[in-house]
Image (cartoon, rainbow, N blue to C red):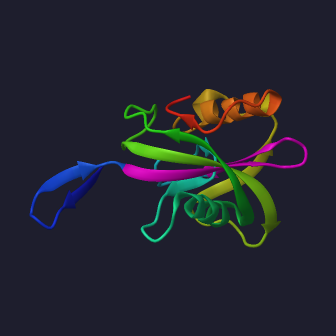
């Protein structure tokens, strides 16, 4: 939660806005990052993503996080999911999450200290649930379902 003080002096706890990038390569493998030690979700796999900055919209935030965590550029093609579940599993904060389908661009830089490693995974070689942070394995599995049999986007709510 974010602790805020408003102009009139009232205080409130507000939800964070987070963004994520679902990136597929030409072999139908999904890009995952393994989070570095010392951050929330340490040593676990996630899709690239993080907190939205004040100066950007959600698609811009997803692309910035993709580049920061993996070094890849990309293009946001569609909003895949808005997850506003206040009880997301394996979370220490209450987030509203915007997940985008991203067309992969070029590798332009190296990943940051937030990322221990990056890798490409098929549906058949995904890490197990215990190796994922947050609810990201469920999001990835739903994406693979979408690739097999497309359904209307965006998904609103938890997977």
Q: Residue furthest right?
A: 27
Name the residue nearer the viewer: 149 or 115: 149
User: Which span is picked out in magenta?
Assistant: 16-34
Inspect this view and state whether residue 133 appears. yes
Residue 63 drawn in magenta: no
Q: Residue furthest left?
A: 9
Left or right: where 55 falls relative to 23: left
Name the residue nearer the viewer: 30 or 97: 97
Which residue lies at the image location 23% right of the left edge and 49% below the top edge?
A: 13
Residue 70 placement: quadrant: bottom right
Inspect this view and state whether residue 42 appears. no
Left or right: where 140 falls relative to 88: right
Quadrant of the rendering where the C terminus is positioned: top right
Which residue lies at the image location 67% right of the left edge and 36% below the top edge?
A: 140
Which residue lies at the image location 39% right of the left edge and 31% below the top edge?
A: 87
Q: Position of residue 105 (x, y in %)?
A: 80, 63
Q: Is residue 74 above or below residue 150?
A: below
Left or right: where 77 falls relative to 130: right
Q: How many marks?
A: 0
Which residue lies at the image location 61% right of the left edge and 28% below the top edge?
A: 129
Left or right: where 51 falls relative to 92: right
Residue 59 placement: quadrant: bottom right
Q: Position of residue 9 (x, y in %)?
A: 9, 63
Q: Position of residue 7 (x, y in %)?
A: 15, 67
Q: Principal SS element in the magenta part? A: strand
Q: Position of residue 99 (x, y in %)?
A: 59, 46
């Amino acid at each position: 939660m974010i602790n805020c003080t408003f102009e009139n002096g009232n205080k409130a706890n507000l939800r964070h806005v987070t963004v994520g990038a679902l990136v597929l390569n030409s072999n139908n493998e999904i890009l995952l990052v393994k989070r570095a030690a010392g951050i929330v979700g340490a040593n676990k796999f996630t899709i690239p993503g993080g907190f939205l900055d004040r100066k950007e919209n959600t698609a811009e935030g997803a692309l910035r996080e993709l580049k920061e965590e993996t070094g890849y550029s990309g293009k946001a093609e569609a909003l895949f999911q808005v997850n506003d579940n206040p009880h997301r599993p394996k979370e220490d904060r209450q987030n509203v999450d915007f997940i985008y389908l991203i067309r992969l661009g070029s590798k332009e830089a190296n990943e940051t200290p937030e990322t221990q490693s990056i890798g490409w995974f098929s549906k058949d070689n995904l890490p197990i649930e215990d190796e994922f942070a947050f609810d990201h394995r469920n999001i990835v599995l739903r994406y693979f379902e979408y690739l097999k049999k497309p359904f209307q986007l965006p998904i609103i709510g938890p997977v």
